[in-house]
Image (cartoon, helix red, strand yellow):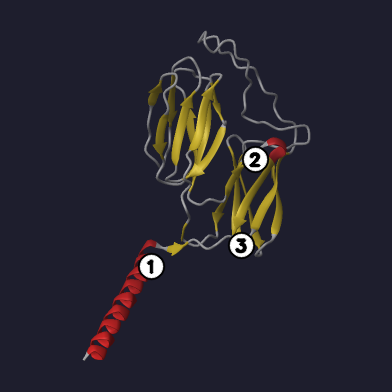
Amino acid sequence: MRETYYKRSYFAVAVACTSLLSLIALNEMIAGTPASPAEGSSVSGVVKFEGTAPPSTVINMAQDPLCASTRATTEDIVADGKGGLENVVVYVSDGLAATNFPMPTEPAVMEQKGCRYHPHVLAMRAGQTLKVINADQTTHNIHPMPANNREWNVSQPKGVDIERTFAREEISIPVKCNIHPWMHSFIAVIKNPYFAVSGEGGKFELKDLPAGTYTLTAWHEKLGTRMQKITVAAGEAKTVEFIFK
């Protein structure tokens, strides 16, 4: 009698566990493919400007006495003596399977300092929190003007932080300050984690990319876009170059 009871109990537990595993599998199918572990592949390279870059000009900030003591130059095209081009968004635009990539726990940060936006070009994930900091002694205004996301326009006194999100991918959202007309920047909102903004020397790197064939897109605010297809094997360190003219 007792043996029969134990057998029935064991069978009931087994059925319950099987049902639970089936339910988990069904939920994963509904939610999408879970992210695959990193395979150690990477894509790095440089973005170059070919030709003579237009000179930067000094920005006149005399309109606001709290900004006037700052000396800053325009950042439309920032290239060094070897042609290394900064502020270019490089990202995987095609080739990734629909995957649930983990969302960053830390916010993307844009700071208003010296009456400028830092960085001039910011890349972030769709759905990630954007934190805007006013480190100046004057009041600013942050006004992103997206085409594929909700537009917002917020006054920002000194010391007050603002947090917002962008739900959809958009390359790239212009940002301005309605109080200080020389202040402008761009926010690139990307649906996957494989992106970078070229820095000093035009260098960039995309880490932990799964093996596969992808389209890489490079975007610049004045020079447009460049695209190229690449194939990376598991564990490979690929090197690429983008040239703008």
In the displayed structure, 159 sits above or below 202; it is: above
- From mark 2 to mark 3, how far is it between C-alphas? 23 Å
Q: Position of residue 110 (x, y in %)?
A: 51, 31
Dot 1: within a 10 Å radius of its alpha carbon, few (fewer than 14), some, or many (20 or more) residues?
few
Q: Is residue 245 visible?
A: no
Q: To which residue does mark 3 refer?
A: 39
Circle 3: residue type: Glu
Circle 1: residue type: Met
In the displayed structure, 162 sits above or below 229; it is: above
Q: Position of residue 197 (x, y in %)?
A: 61, 41
Point 40% across, 45% down: residue: 167
Dot 3: within a 10 Å radius of its alpha carbon, few (fewer than 14), some, or many (20 or more) residues?
some
Q: Position of residue 121 (x, y in %)?
A: 56, 35
Disc nearer the start of the sequence (2/1) = 1
Classify mark 3: helix, strand or loop.
Answer: loop
Q: To which residue does mark 1 refer?
A: 29
Point 62% across, 23% down: residue: 74
Q: To which residue does mark 2 refer?
A: 198
